[in-house]
Image (cartoon, grey):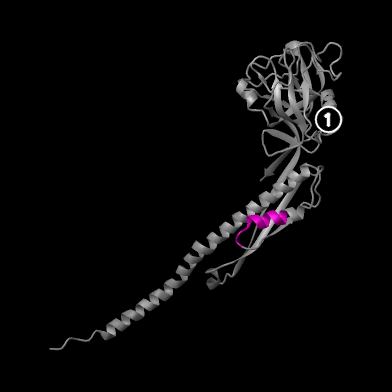
Amino acid sequence: MSRPSRSGTAHDERGAVNVVVALLMIPLIGFAAIAIDVSAMWSERQQLQTGADASALAIAQDCARQACGTPSATASSLTSANFIAGTASAQVLTPALSSATGRVTVRTSTVTQHVFAPLLGFDQADLSARATVRWGSPTGGSAVLPLAFGWCEFEQQTGGGLPSSTTRHTIFQTKTSDTGCTGPSGNLVPGGFGWLRTDPGTCRASSTISMDVPTDPGSSVPSTCTSADLVGMLDTTVLLPIFDRYQGTGSSATYHVYAYAAFRVTAYHFGGQNSYGSPCNGNDRCIRGYFTTMVELDDAFEYSTTAPQLGASIVSLTD
């Protein structure tokens, strides 16, 4: 007895499978496009954003130092360095760069070629990113060293102009300063040695331009400042308030903040255990270092393009 033949049925099933596979190819290609092409686009978009951020920050820092150079060349170089997927271009959108504008925007772009999406009719895509950075002189914040210098002292140390070198100076606090800034009494205000009243529980002093900041009377370091706080400021550049007016006596005395200057701390002698490097000794109180230029990427200070420029600038990446 012979078996019935199944060849026709098998052929029909193979044909049905071919139809199903053909129908599924379109969504399979779509999934591949999403998995590979979209992922590649995301990666390239991140590289473009990194390039835009780096370019805008670099240009802003150069301009904050009054040396903008060639912004377009800076943007092109940093965009290429941060884009590894191919070729990307950069465009500086801000037409004029100066301390007056205090703003720069960089746009980066590329054309990405798809791998699977062309099967769906999408050969390429335009990608772009942009970043805006602002800069200006500090107008207020929390100084990590609660010490203020008078405008006269600043002029004496910088020769009356902006800081331009790293020549170190030993700056004596009032009473022992020999710059002629303090007058016959030795102190600008009775009982005042330049220390500021600290924020509660910290060794910091918050202030803003045009603010009358309260003083911490006496020659000793404020009680909230530890030896570790002072050691931590060595070989760092800190922002210090510069005051142009003063009034009152003792704990009621105040200094009127004019601007902020950058000071590099290399040694100090504030009496007792609070001494490093022996810049002075005995009953003298002094700090050694130099007024310098500084561009700070920090949100601890507010800034403005209209604030007095004494060598310190704040750079901030905006949304």
Q: Nearer the viewer, residue 198 or 312?
A: 312
Q: Farthest residue to the left: give it.
A: 1
Under circle 1, the secondary element is helix
Q: Is residue 231 above or below residue 247?
A: below
In the rendered structure, does residue 55 fall within the stretch colored magenta?
no
Query: Looking at the picture, how far across and down is residue 213, in whole percent?
Result: 74, 21
Instruction: Residue 128: give x, y in percent of width and height.
Output: 65, 58
Q: On screen, 315 above or below 223?
A: below
Q: What secondary structure do most residues of the magenta stretch adopt?
A: helix
Residue 40 sits in quarter: bottom right
Question: 217 or 235: nearer the eye?
Answer: 235
Disc 1 marks which amino acid? Thr
Relative placement, left or right, of 30 versus 68 is left
Instruction: Using the image, determine if residue 55 lies above or below residue 286.
Output: below
Determine which quarter of the picture holds residue 295: top right
Q: Residue 222 at what x, y percent from top left?
A: 67, 17
Is residue 92 visible in this depiction of the protein? no
26 and 256: which is toward the camera: 256
> Number of marks in the image?
1
Residue 186 visible in the displayed image: yes
Q: Which residue range is magenta in the image?
A: 75-85
Q: Which residue is mark 1?
A: 158
Q: Would you place residue 185 above or below residue 5 in this image?
A: above
Percent from the top left, x then y, of residue 224?
62, 18
Q: Quadrant of the N terminus?
A: bottom left
Say which residue appears at 35% left-offset and 78% top-offset: 16
Q: Is 253 left or right of 228, judged from the image as shown? A: right
Which residue is most to the bottom?
Answer: 1
Q: Residues within 10 Å of mark 1 (few under 14, many from 20)?
A: some
